[in-house]
Image (cartoon, rainbow, N blue to C red):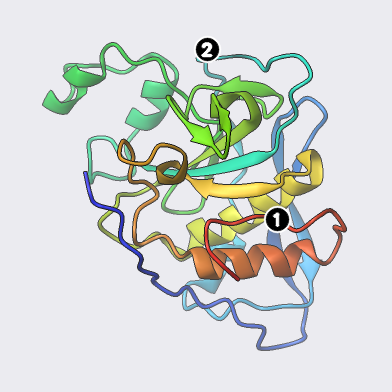
Amino acid sequence: MMDKVTMTVPVTLAHTASTPISSPTFLIGEDGWCTAQSQRIPATLNMPDLPELLNVPEVRHEPSPNCDPRPQGISVELLVIHNISLPPGKFNTPFIADLFCNRLNYDADPYFEQLRPLRVSAHFLIRRDGGVVQFVATTQRAWHAGVSSFGARERCNDFSIGIELEGTDYEPFTSPQYVALYALTHALLKRHGLTAVCGHSDIAPGRKTDPGPFFDWVQYQQAVVDRRAQVLTTPRLGFPIEG
């Protein structure tokens, strides 16, 4: 476990030209399942891996049994950002999906033995290449937050959506992950009218440290606010940083 540290690692998303380009965008249907689309927007991404960013993989659906209906009358208001890697520090493995879908081979790695009693899930996983996997419909309650509170409200699973970024507390996330996260956040705002975004560490302080000190809250907030302003007029979205 890492102590909570304030730190940002900039991800450059600069408006450097007016020529429209294809940018990833997602649509979340009435059933709460997400699909990938392409949209022309008057911006460009100042990143060396731009061609790869524009080649957006389809959203893959892997329904998890680890979910249940939200309490009656409860609306989705909070987005929670996590990180995960299985085994810790190893990327591009099938084990995250296996854990969330209750098919993990606990003999595949010594670390997995401690996961045996867990029944957990998140709504989404964003892999290192920007690919998105959805495990639970956004209309359903995923089991991602655990013992948690946001303000005076407990049981954050009831009113939140969980996004896992494939990564750790100890290294930066990738440019494709940020691009996918911006687009997915935008889709969630349009579908559910979220009022706040936070990290797992913000709702479970002392117990959780993710998304960790390498997650760039400043750049994420700016990108989401800029994109949201194009189409949304809902109240200001709350972030765990000032600005």
Residue 187 vertical placement versus 33 (above, below): below
* Image-quadrant location for residue 115: top left
Residue 181 vertical placement versus 76 (above, below): below
* Image-quadrant location for residue 71: top right
Residue 172 vertical placement versus 197 (above, below): below
Quarter occupied by the N terminus: top left
What residue does disc 2 label?
A: 65
Residue that extends furthest to the front in the rendered view of this protein: 152
Mark 2–mark 1 contact, CB under 8 Å? no
Q: Is disc 1 surrounded by few (<14), some (14 to 19) or many (20+) residues within 10 Å?
A: some
What residue does disc 1 label?
A: 237
- In the image, is 44 to the left or to the right of 101? right
Find the distance from the CA under tag 2 to the CA under tag 1. 31 Å
Observer able to see residue 234: yes
Amino acid at pointer 2: Pro
In the image, 79 versus 26, the foreground residue is: 79
Residue 41 vertical placement versus 24 (above, below): below
